[in-house]
Amino acid sequence: MLHSGHVAFFKEASRYGDLYVGIGSDATVAELKHRRTVYSEKERLYMVKAIRYVTDAYINSGSGMLDFLDTLDRVKPDIFVVNSDGGSDAKRRLCAERGIEYIELERVPDEGLEARSTTSLRTGVKSHLPYRIDIAGTWIDQPYVSCHGAGWAITASVEPTVEFMERSGMSTSTRNAARKIWPYELPDYHEERLAKLLFCLENDPENEGGHISGAQDAIGICVAGISRHYYDGHYWPLKIESCNDERVLSWLESHICLVPMFPRRQGCSVVDGQDINPKKVAALTSAADSCWSALLDCDLTAFAEAFRRSFEAQIAMFPAMMQPGVEEYIEQWRDKALAWKMLGSGGGGYLALVVESIPAEGVIPIKIRRKA
């Protein structure tokens, strides 16, 4: 993320002579910081070379913290300049061994400008972490449900095209937990392992409340595209399957949208009055099976029917999901949508609609996150 702090550093460094800049490669940044670069190495090289204080610039061909060794051999500098947070004893020793003067510069912005760093910019930038929407099988990820019958939950990872409200069934609490370790974006790493790490982070074993957030929240955020996960009486699924077929993702985006209602009210307990038995769980898992098949076939009629059955199975087990005011929102769309359900555990938040085509007003389209 090129910013004024970099330019100020280049300006100060250029006072020592002709300035040659070594730039970390995309691979090295990913290795050291476990995330993708905002700009590719080619873009970064182009921008740095365009700065008037820079004589020339190179992509460092090495790896790790001393990735610039080949660049040193190429340039043969008299002076090696770093900013204070980029300095190290290893760099100081290296310069001493090669007879190169070593200089560390403090971050000093030009007059009238704020001090800038990539870290501070990332902290202030809107998070790109995805949300998740649940499509079918919701509640099966809780062992007290799946112990009556194993089955699949289906989720989609969605881009943060809007700032979705809290307590809304979009896994905002799990996303907030993720932001503590990944404030800007998910690392470029094995998706299922990221999901399990997030699940363990959110569900602290010392938590006195005793509530365990369902694994579908972490999986829905971390696993790109549409995924289904199979629960059999345990907190973590036995298996996870993903669909990243562009035909299916585009089809779902053109037939599902969200209607904002109201956040789940403080003190609302959607588990009050629960009635769970094998027959009701079988209805939930059967609907999820049908929903997955319809998704892969891009069969709108079958998808809408399974989507509706999944929601009916949810509220049959957890009638408190239908808090006062929810039915009024459903009534507004009963003749316009093919099917509907509340996201997450319900009680408020967002109503997801299955439609022939996305209405021009009153809804929020979704953008499913594609696999990088």
Image: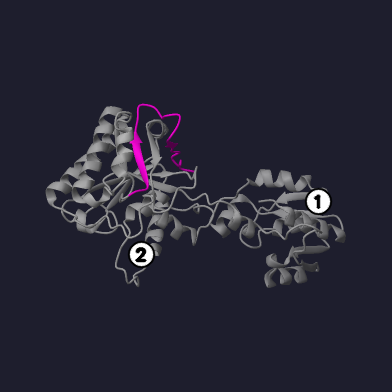
Image location of residue 41, percent across then percent down: 65, 47
Assess disc 2: are there few (<14), some (14-19) or many (≥20) residues with their C-alpha within 10 Å of its C-alpha. Answer: some
In front of the other: 270 or 120? 270
Is residue 233 something that shows in the picture?
no
Assess disc 1: are there few (<14), some (14-19) or many (≥20) residues with their C-alpha within 10 Å of its C-alpha. Answer: some
Q: Residue at left 59%, top 58%? A: 123
Rendered image quadrant of residue 47: top right
Horizontally, residue 299 falls left or right of residue 275, namely right
Residue picked out by circle 2: 203
Q: Amino acid at mark 2?
A: Asn
- Secondary structure, mark 2, is loop
Determine whether 50 is above or below 108 in the image: above
What colour scheme has been applied to the protein in the rendered image? one colour
Image location of residue 229, percent across then percent down: 30, 48
Q: Is residue 191 magenta?
A: no
Residue picked out by circle 1: 54
Q: Residue at left 35%, top 72%? A: 206
Q: Residue at left 66%, top 53%? A: 61
- Secondary structure, mark 1, is loop
Q: Which residues are magenta?
A: 348-372
Image location of residue 348, percent across then percent down: 34, 48
| Label whose residue precedes the other's in the sequence (2 or 1) | 1
Horizontally, residue 259 falls left or right of residue 324, namely right
Image location of residue 5, percent across then percent down: 73, 57
Rendered image quadrant of residue 95: bottom right
- Residue 17 is marked as none
Horizontally, residue 184 falls left or right of residue 310, namely right
Determine whether 279 is above or below 117 in the image: above
SS majority, magenta: loop
Q: Amino acid at mark 1?
A: Val
Q: Is residue 363 magenta?
A: yes
Q: Residue at left 39%, top 27%? A: 357
